Image: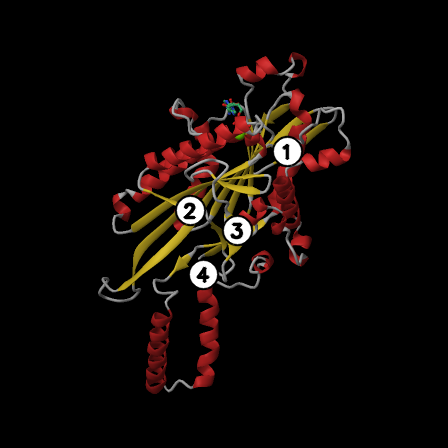
Amino acid sequence: MVHATKEKESSTVQVALRIKPLTTDDLANLPSRFQKNVLSTTQFAPNQVMVHGEKKQSWTFDKVFGPEASQKDIYDQIVKNMVDKFLEGFNVTILAYGQTSSGKTYTMGTSNEYSQLPESKGIIPRSMATLFSYVNSTQYKSRKFVIKVSFVEIYNEDLIDLLAEGDYESRPSVTIREDSKGNVIWSGLQEIKVNSIEEVMGHLMRGSMSRQVSATEMNSQSSRSHAIFSVMLSQQKFVTDFGKKNNEEGDWVTVTSKFHFVDLAGSERLKRTSAIGDRVKEGISINSGLLALGNVISVLGDPAKAKNAMHIPYRDSKLTRLLQDSLGGNAKTLMIACVSPAEYNINETISTLKYANRARNIKNSAIVNKEEPGWQDIEHLQNLVLKLRADIKALKDSDGLNSTSFQPDAIYLQQNYFGYETTDSISEENKD
Ligand code: ADP
Ligand code: MG
């Protein structure tokens, strides 16, 4: 358990839907009789989408963006507030879900191409611009910031470090473990320190190029792999002691937070058009990470199950292991479901709507990750204990406070201080 303060808030996972416009490529590639638009939105019900298939369906999300929505609309309306949370010290995750070609990479901005027009830049470059304007602002001049990035790909349950040097195949593999406090640690992964937005974008480019090179070598791997670009932020700020006259007294407090940008594998069942199409083959071809993610979401999304489930199946895939503390745990989560409006894709679109809809009930319990300097240092803690004992003794001597009346207060304070809460069943589940 992270040593955290009581700055704690509960929220559900946010789920937004984005309908992409049909591009000239789509118009050239989709059979013309299936190009009909089968999705519609209305300004009278801004968070709903209607599907005009054999039967009409309507689905509600936290936010629905039609084909006319710009990259800036997406950023301003649903992402900006996540970046603010990240800067406050929360762990934040944004997942892009949907079938291949539905706009996941475009929305996320995972392949930051030089040729890109500024208005078509995606979520990652926009978030990084906000991050660096914060870090460089005069308001936070007294803070010390350290920013690191990593970029990992999950393919067939292998973790591949996209920022590692050397041959794609000969790179050391990344393993996942947990520390004694239950934090998920990705070991063997490069975390590269960055000082500017250009450096971040350089690493993003390099990583996504290494992903694309392998895609041609390994049979269009990129649509079947997940890409997770992560930014780790550590902020040291000086907190003045409350109530002291001289405001130079205080302590350095370190707040750390991580931001995962997840460009998920294509959600389509491979071989969907294949004549062989038997159930077993189809089952195997579903991406195991998406399957496990769906199962985790389904357990968390059902309040009765989430309360009683002894085991939320995070361990069923690398993806859910990596994101364990981002789903139902100590994090803010946004899923952006991407769909195509064309009739040709209607079955995949409906399955995306179903999948995304299951995510809407997850209760996340986010806390600010704050750690005092010296918290890991036994000698410092021992000295602190001695000092506190002396303080208590002095208090007792002066106020006539006896030990039996003091203890319950001490326990109460400690509970608050560590941020434990017993009311939130999901955060309890996630402690182990
Ligand atoms: P995915 O990552 O889901 O496979 P992409 O993001 O690569 O899909 O999108 C497929 C194609 O559609 C790309 O050429 C992309 O530029 C284009 N595209 C996706 N969404 C939009 C959008 N909202 N506006 C314009 N073009 C888009
Ligand atoms: Mg993509």
Can you give x and y, in whole percent of width and height, for residue 21 in the image? Answer: 54, 21
At 76% from the left and 24% from the top, the residue drawn is 275
Element carrying mark 3 = strand
Q: Which residue is mark 2?
A: 86
Say which mark, if any, is on residue 6. 4
Q: Whole-Å distance between the Cαs marked 4 and 2?
A: 17 Å
Under tag 4, what secondary structure? loop
Tell me what residue is drawn at x 73 percent, y 34 percent: 281
Rendered residue at 53%/31% (across/down): 104
Gap in angstroms between the C-alphas marked 3 and 2: 23 Å
Q: Dot 2: what SS?
A: helix
Is the residue marked by circle 1 packed among few (<14), some (14-19), or many (20+) residues within 10 Å? many
Mark 3 or mark 1: which is in front? Answer: 3
Precedes in sequence: disc 1 or disc 4: 4
Q: Mark 3 packing: few (<14 Cα in 10 Å), some, or many (20+)?
A: some
Q: Which residue is mark 3?
A: 176
Task: Name the residue: 33% across, 77% down.
Answer: 387
Could you say which is closer to the camera, residue 284 or residue 364?
284
Identity of the amino acid at label 1?
A: Thr
Q: Alpha carbon of mark 3 to alpha carbon of mark 4: how far?
A: 29 Å
Q: Amino acid at mark 3?
A: Ile
Q: Which of the two marks, 3 or 2, is nearer to us in this view?
A: 3
Q: Residues within 10 Å of mark 4 (few under 14, many from 20)?
A: some
